[in-house]
Image (spheres, rainbow, N blue to C red):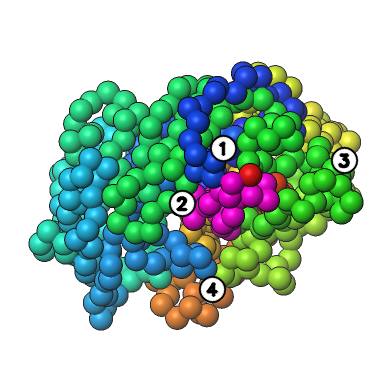
């Protein structure tokens, strides 16, 4: 979701804002009235971009998935289902996919979408000049993509246009998660004429999705309008109005200025009180998200597994979840969140044990805490105070290990897209699934040399297990290999797992069909607003 997940993550930014309560106070902008029941009003923040090839954060995706679409999308059970592709066949060796496209799909301006538009979109995403940090992850299994990414050619050899409505795609090995990757925005189709108009063309996007961008005023307002020529079931509301940075969302919800709001832990008692006014509006859903402390294994002292394990054993995650988060998150022993295929109830985590943590430091080459080099943790922030959760973690290291940890904050966009180069000895990070598959966490975040392996972790044994799991077409055997890889990562303290997320959302009783999937994203075309 980060969802480069899905990082991340603007989620870290939003979480920080929720914790500190430091919300901008720009008053809501009046919107031209529409007939009652035809407008859904939400709180929002500005997307980093509306270019599907470049976007790697959940906040941007919230808008992108409404404006654009691709060959496939995730269904209600988070399995890949037909979208612009009406059907597909797979070769016997599992490496060639032939997609048959619908013939009734139009860009917002009315131009027909053809197979060549997908070839163009994917090749553009992979060209170095585009600057995509996601193309190698989500398109990299396709034969010829690596050559385009390296600037050696502009054409993906593994993508062939058979005719206007048939696209043939060849990947380098059979992979059970390939179709799921094609539900990620990097593979969405864009209009070449739109892109060639230059500048920030994505501020006037000509997409194919159920909504069009009607208006975007930075820091104030973003409005989506129903796409009347959408090829599938059209949206039920004519407008979706996002009030950007318009106040404290909970207060806006109480005053009926917005129809939906997320709930921070500061309001949990208020909304979970069965006798209170908000309980009937409350929707609690799990999310395939993972928050953790990343260790930069290229810098001392975290090039030493003993030190990584010591810092992990020194954090009481149960207390963190209870006291800081008021039990709104689930403490994490491992990496794969509950609900994802391969989740392991029997996984053995590095549990809270202060004595063992101190013993591990004593056994390390540093001898004791006083011998450790200076340690800084990198986090997202705008220069204000740090979040309560990070403050509590740093306090535990201080009390349990006698270690002082400095904090360096990075502006949110710089943090999201450049943490790999910017990370200090540690970094505070989050990841939301792009698709419900263990490869999306274990391989993308911890494989040696992976683009989102921001701590530079490398373990040949883990790489071998991931290689085997990624091409194993027997589902049970593949999941067993992923579980084994996860246990190895935990044992070696590849990171410090903190918690898995849940979404607490208030929805007005006159709003129907608003649901967050396990990726934390709504399909707004399914939402209706009753007269009220």
Q: Check disc 3: other Cα within 10 Å, few if <14, some if 14-19, many if 20+.
A: some
Left or right: where 305 falls relative to 183: right
Residue 402 versus residue 98: which sits nearer the camera? 98
Specify which label sits upstream in the sequence, 3 or 1: 1
Q: Which residue is mark 1?
A: 41
Specify which label sits upstream in the sequence, 4 or 1: 1
Residue at x 59% of width, y 46% of height:
531
Specify which label sits upstream in the sequence, 2 or 1: 1
Total labels: the figure holds 4
Q: Which residue is mark 2?
A: 236
Taking the magenta stretch, the answer to whether it contains residue 142 is no
Q: Is residue 206 above or below residue 404?
A: below
Which span is picked out in magenta?
508-531
Q: Which element is circle 1 on?
A: strand
Mark-to-mark CA distance, 3 and 4: 36 Å
The main secondary structure of the magenta stretch is: loop
Q: Are marks 2 and 1 in contact (CB under 8 Å)?
A: no
Q: Is residue 350 above or below residue 214?
A: below
Q: Which residue is mark 4?
A: 479
Which marked residue is nearer to the observer: mark 4 or mark 2?
Answer: 2
Residue at x 66% of width, y 70% of height:
344
For residue 400, which numbered disc appears in the image? 3
Measuring from the top left, give residue 26's x and y in whole percent: 62, 18
Q: Which element is circle 3 on?
A: helix
Tell me the quadrant of the picture where the C terminus can be found: top right
Specify which label sits upstream in the sequence, 2 or 3: 2
Which marked residue is nearer to the observer: mark 4 or mark 1?
Answer: 1
Q: Is residue 504 above or below residue 160?
A: above
Left or right: where 190 falls relative to 474: left
Specify which label sits upstream in the sequence, 3 or 4: 3
Mark-to-mark CA distance, 4 and 2: 39 Å
Mark-to-mark CA distance, 2 and 3: 55 Å
């Amino acid at each position: 979701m980060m969802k480069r997940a899905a990082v991340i993550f603007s989620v870290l930014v939003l979480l920080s804002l929720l914790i500190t309560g430091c919300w901008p106070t720009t008053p809501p902008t009046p919107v031209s009235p529409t007939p009652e029941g035809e407008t859904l009003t939400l709180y929002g923040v500005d997307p980093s971009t509306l270019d599907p090839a470049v976007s790697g954060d959940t906040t941007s995706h919230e808008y992108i998935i409404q404006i654009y679409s691709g060959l496939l999308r995730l269904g209600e059970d988070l399995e890949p289902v037909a979208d612009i592709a009406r059907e597909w066949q797979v070769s016997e060796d599992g490496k060639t996919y032939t997609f048959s496209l619908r013939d009734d799909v139009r860009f917002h301006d009315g131009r027909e979408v053809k197979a060549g538009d997908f070839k163009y979109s994917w090749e553009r995403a992979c060209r170095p000049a585009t600057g995509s940090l996601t193309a190698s992850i989500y398109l990299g299994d396709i034969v010829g993509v690596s050559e385009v990414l390296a600037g050696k050619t502009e054409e993906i050899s593994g993508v062939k246009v058979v005719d206007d409505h048939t696209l043939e795609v060849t990947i380098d090995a059979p992979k059970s998660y390939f179709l799921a990757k094609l539900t990620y925005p990097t593979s969405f189709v864009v209009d070449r004429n739109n892109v060639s108009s230059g500048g920030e063309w994505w501020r006037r996007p000509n997409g194919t999705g159920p909504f069009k961008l009607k208006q975007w005023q930075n820091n104030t307002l973003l409005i989506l309008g129903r796409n009347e020529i959408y090829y599938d079931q059209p949206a039920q509301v004519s407008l979706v109005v996002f009030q950007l940075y318009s106040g404290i969302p909970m207060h806006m919800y109480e005053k009926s200025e917005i129809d939906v709001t997320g709930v921070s832990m500061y309001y949990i008692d208020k909304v979970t009180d069965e006798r209170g006014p908000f309980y009937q509006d409350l929707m609690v859903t799990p999310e395939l998200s993972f928050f953790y402390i990343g260790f930069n294994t290229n810098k001392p002292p975290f090039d030493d597994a003993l030190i990584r394990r010591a810092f992990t054993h020194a954090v009481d995650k149960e207390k963190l979840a209870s006291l800081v988060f008021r039990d709104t998150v689930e403490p994490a022993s491992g990496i794969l969140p509950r609900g994802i295929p391969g989740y392991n109830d029997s996984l053995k985590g590095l549990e809270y044990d202060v004595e063992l943590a101190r013993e591990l430091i004593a056994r390390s080459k540093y001898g004791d805490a006083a011998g450790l080099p200076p340690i800084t943790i990198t986090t997202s922030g705008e220069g204000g105070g740090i979040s309560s959760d990070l403050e509590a973690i740093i306090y535990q290291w201080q009390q349990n290990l006698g270690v002082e940890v400095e904090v360096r904050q990075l502006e949110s966009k710089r943090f999201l897209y450049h943490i790999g180069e910017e990370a200090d000895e540690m970094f505070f990070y989050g990841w939301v699934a792009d698709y419900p598959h263990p490869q999306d966490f274990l391989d993308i975040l911890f494989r040696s040399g992976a683009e989102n392996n921001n701590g530079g972790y490398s373990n040949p044994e883990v790489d071998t297990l991931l290689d085997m799991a990624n091409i194993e077409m027997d589902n049970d055997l593949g999941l067993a290999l992923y579980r084994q890889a996860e246990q190895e990562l935990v044992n070696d303290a590849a990171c410090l797992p903190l918690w898995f997320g849940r979404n607490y959302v208030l929805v007005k009783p006159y709003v129907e069909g608003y649901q967050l999937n396990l990726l934390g994203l709504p399909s707004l075309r399914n939402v209706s607003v009753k007269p009220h």
